[in-house]
Amino acid sequence: MSTTDDVIERTSPEPLPSTPAELLEWCRTHRADNPVHYDERQRSWQVFRYVDVAEVLGDPARYLADLGDLRPSNPELDLMQRGNFVNMDGPRHRMLRGLVSQAFTSKVVTALTPKITTLTGELLDAVADRESFDLVDALAYPLPVTVVSELLGVPAEDRPLFRRWAEQLFPFNEEDSNVAGTQDAMDALIPAVREMIEYFRAQLDRRRARPADDLTTRLVEAETAADKLTDDDIIGVITLLLTAGHVTTTALLGNAVLTLHEHPEAAARLRTDRDALPSAVDEVLRYRPSLPWLTRRTATEVTLAGQVIPAGDVIMPWLVSANRDEAKFRDPDVFDIGRRPNQYLSFGHGIHYCLGAPLAKLETRIALGLLFDRYREIAVVDDEFHHPFAMGGAKSLSVAVVR
């Protein structure tokens, strides 16, 4: 990473916001006063305005998803990155994304509706005798992880492993969002990573011996047919889907229930007008994005909002800030389930737009619909959040329900 000592004036790191409300105010201040600046604590350029965030995410030639050698290196972690096309550019990104996208076409996702509806019903059946429960534990976590497991062909009895691995791989309570991480933090992940690699190597062997109608089999067959993928590539892809494929959806569903609790007039409308659910989920995504920021690295020297950024520097485009930009959205702090247009950036923008976005939104729409069907009242009585710099979602969300 290049030095920026000659480009900007160094300042002492400012205190980081520790609550969602503080984060929004922090973003609002920077949008107005310092929309693109270098943060020494994060060792990266912070980008806050919608127009600038969209430019960074929409120009893969100048702003690379691959952070290169910035992260501490380790053989196991390097293996995981081999299939992580979210952090890739160029032909390899297109090849891997193209293979995985076969499992997320509109036709495939729509066909999952009956299965997701059944799974949601079964999860709610398990808490049918309770007047209160933790929505994250009961529904928001197990629903997407089960759907991802189904797509990958993971046996039902092995699915608890997914939660443990995901929790170990995502240090959500870390205040420091330094994108490069630290060697100690990376070393702490190694036991879980090794266990995952061993598990999925065995899973690939099983699929070669007994093919099935799942994404793992399709990836194995692509490897055999075109010699495009190695086992390490496939394990990297599976790891990406395991983590990104359900963690953000868990946050989205919890955020939807919390936001509708805070806006009872919107919840009342949705109970009588289910056709408004798609736009309501979109507005939740704008209002409370699961991921607060993304990362990019400059391929060459660029000028963004008047700031000269050297080649090789890291950029953090703040999605949560772009989604509240007054220059883009009318009354951005108002939760409006009828908002049109609603060009939020919560799933990214451009060629790296999240493949799983349609599935995440479908799961959330189905879950909200069934919750409304089963309960006349749903009230949030307690919550615990991840650190807002790491994740925009609840660790737990206790709800009281009335049938």
Image (spheres, grey):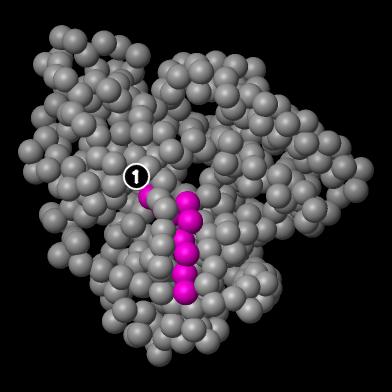
In-front residue for pair 138/170: 138
At horizontal 21% and vertical 31% (from top left) the residue drawn is: 15
Q: Is residue 264 left or right of residue 80?
A: left
In which image quadrant can residue 212 be found?
bottom right
Magenta region: which residues? Answer: 392-400
In which image quadrant can residue 282 be found?
bottom left
Secondary structure that dominates the magenta span? strand
Q: Is residue 55 left or right of residue 282?
A: left
The residue labelled by disc 1 is 388
In which quadrant of the rendered image does the N terminus lie?
Answer: top left
In the image, what residue type sits under mark 1?
Answer: Pro
Query: Can residue 110 be seen in this snapshot?
Result: yes
Q: Position of residue 134 (x, y in %)?
A: 53, 63
At horizontal 26% and vertical 72% (from top left) the residue drawn is: 336
Q: Secondary structure at mark 1?
A: loop
Q: Is residue 398 magenta-colored?
A: yes
58 is higher (above) or lower (below) than 249: above
Q: Is residue 397 left or right of residue 53?
A: right
Q: Position of residue 382 (x, y in %)?
A: 41, 62
94 is higher (above) or lower (below) than 25: above
Q: Position of residue 189 (x, y in %)?
A: 59, 27
352 is higher (above) or lower (below) than 275: above
At horizontal 57% and vertical 50% (from top left) the residue drawn is: 245
Q: Position of residue 169 (x, y in %)?
A: 56, 35
Q: Is residue 346 magenta-colored?
A: no
Query: Can residue 300 be seen in this snapshot?
Result: no
316 is higher (above) or lower (below) than 20: above
